[in-house]
Amino acid sequence: MEKQPDYHPDFESWPPAGTQTKPEWVMPEWPITIGRGIIGRCPHCGAAPIFDGYLKVHKLCLHCGAPLGDMPSDDAPPYIAMLVVLHVLALFVIFFYKGDYHPGLLMAGFLLLMLALICMAALRMAKGAVIGVLLKLGLKREVPNG
Ligand SMILES: [Zn+2]
């Protein structure tokens, strides 16, 4: 006969009580947080821009001081941008191979230019949204040695 393990309250919920870090910032609801990120405004206050340039993030929000620069968005924004944009591109590829669509050289060049611009815009929007999600979850980058 097997011995039943002793009941331990810490194993009843995950993560164990006391180990979960709360976000330092009281954030708005999810749609507002993500929407502000998509339009490039601070997900916390919405009053200042996230970006200092094209993709460089301000270390702290210029209005409320939220730690925007500590959010490790890493590879998520390019992944999301490609996921969205390449689904639109796939439509053109399918039309082309079915023989329904034959762009001239000028139109093909224009479409390539539009694709590049849309990718750039989508990357910036995705990065803003990811920073918003990370800020709401309180997932700051680990700082080595303190
Ligand atoms: Zn702010």
Image (cartoon, rainbow, N blue to C red):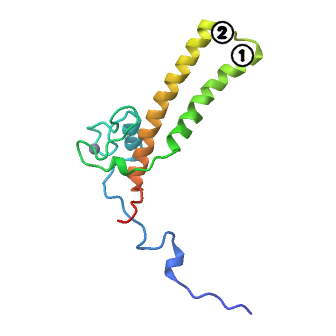
The furthest residue to the left: 63
Task: Tell me which image quadrant ligand 1 sits in.
Answer: top left
Relative to 103, is 85 above or below?
A: below
Query: How far across and how far down the image is residue 78, in percent?
Result: 53, 38
Residue to which mark 1 is pinned: 96
**Residue at screen point 34% across, 43% down:** 43
Circles 1 and 2: CB distance less than 8 Å? yes
Badge 1 amino acid: Phe
- Left or right: residue 52 compared with residue 126: left
Query: How far across and how far down the image is residue 141, in percent?
Result: 41, 56
Query: How far across and how far down the image is residue 33, in percent?
Result: 38, 43
The furthest residue to the front: 145
- Left or right: residue 57 compared with residue 75: left
Residue 80, quarter of the rendered image: top right
**Residue at screen point 42% across, 59% down:** 142
Relative to 78, is 91 above or below?
A: above
